[in-house]
Amino acid sequence: IQSADDEYKYGAVKRYEKTAHVERALEAMQKHGLRVKCDHMFDLPGEPANAQDTARRLYAKHPPYRIQTYWTNLLPGTEMVDQALENGLVSREQVDRLEEGFDFDFFRESNLGRDPTRMRVFKSYETLFKLLPVLPRRLRERWTADTFSRLPALACTLLGFLVDAGYGLFS
């Protein structure tokens, strides 16, 4: 899924499916008993701020079996690196480090700007997304990233780890 913002997805990351198509696919797979796993990306350059909440509503309405989260990392020689450099999201020095093989860890954090406030918001969404599939409907609809923003980042990381470990051990 990567992003739930159709306009952004189409223009920036060249993903052409619409959220309505994703919803129909989730419904069809769930109707036939398939355990759906979704991949969600954080810190996509230029993604609108409300895109995470759009994704939250999608996942709450059509909870997949599992939501795996990844952090956007720029890859050398890609159009996204050029866009990030042009838009001031990364410096020439950061791009040089990237091309030398430094600053790359897409499982835990982004190699983009690392604005602590943005990263904290994403960490709250990451925790929520990992928990959504196991929450009862009532909580899926009520809980937001704000529910987790008051927790220390370490607690969010621990919750996410426990859910991932649970999937690994019991599924």
Image (tube, rainbow, N blue to C red):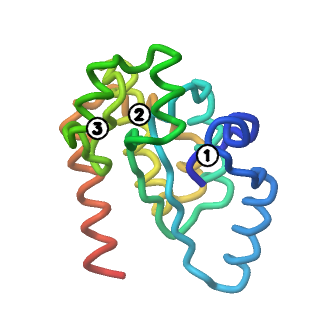
Does the residue at mark 3 contact the one at mark 2 (Cβ under 8 Å)?
A: no
Q: Determine whether the residue tagged by mark 3 lies in a helix, strand or loop.
A: helix
- Which residue occupies 30% across, 63% down? 164
Residue in front for this viewpoint, 68 or 132: 68
Task: Give the residue at the far top of this rendering.
Answer: 88
Q: Which residue is mark 1?
A: 141
Q: Determine whether the residue tagged by mark 2 lies in a helix, strand or loop.
A: helix
The picture places residue 23, in percent across and down from the top left corner, at 75, 59
State whether residue 96 is above or below residue 157.
above
Q: CA distance from mark 3 to mark 1?
A: 42 Å
Give the mark, 3 or 1, whose residue is nearer the N terminus.
3
The quadrant of the rendering that contains the C terminus is bottom left
Q: Amino acid at mark 3?
A: Glu
Give the mark, 3 or 2, whose residue is nearer the N terminus.
3
Q: CA distance from mark 2 to mark 1?
A: 19 Å
Q: Quadrant of residue 32?
A: bottom right
Judged by depth in the image, the label closer to the viewer, 3 or 2, is 3
- Which residue occupies 58% across, 43% down? 56
The picture places residue 58, in percent across and down from the top left corner, at 66, 50
State whether residue 113 is above or below residue 31.
above
Q: Amino acid at mark 2?
A: Phe
Q: Residues within 10 Å of mark 2 (few under 14, many from 20)?
A: many
Does the residue at mark 2 contact the one at mark 1 (Cβ under 8 Å)?
A: no
Q: Which residue is mark 2?
A: 122
Residue in front for this viewpoint, 63 or 4: 4
Judged by depth in the image, the label closer to the viewer, 2 or 1, is 2
Give the mark, 2 or 1, whose residue is nearer the N terminus.
2
Residue 128 falls left or right of residue 6: left
- Which residue occupies 24% across, 59% down? 162
Task: Give the residue at the far bottom of this rendering.
Answer: 32
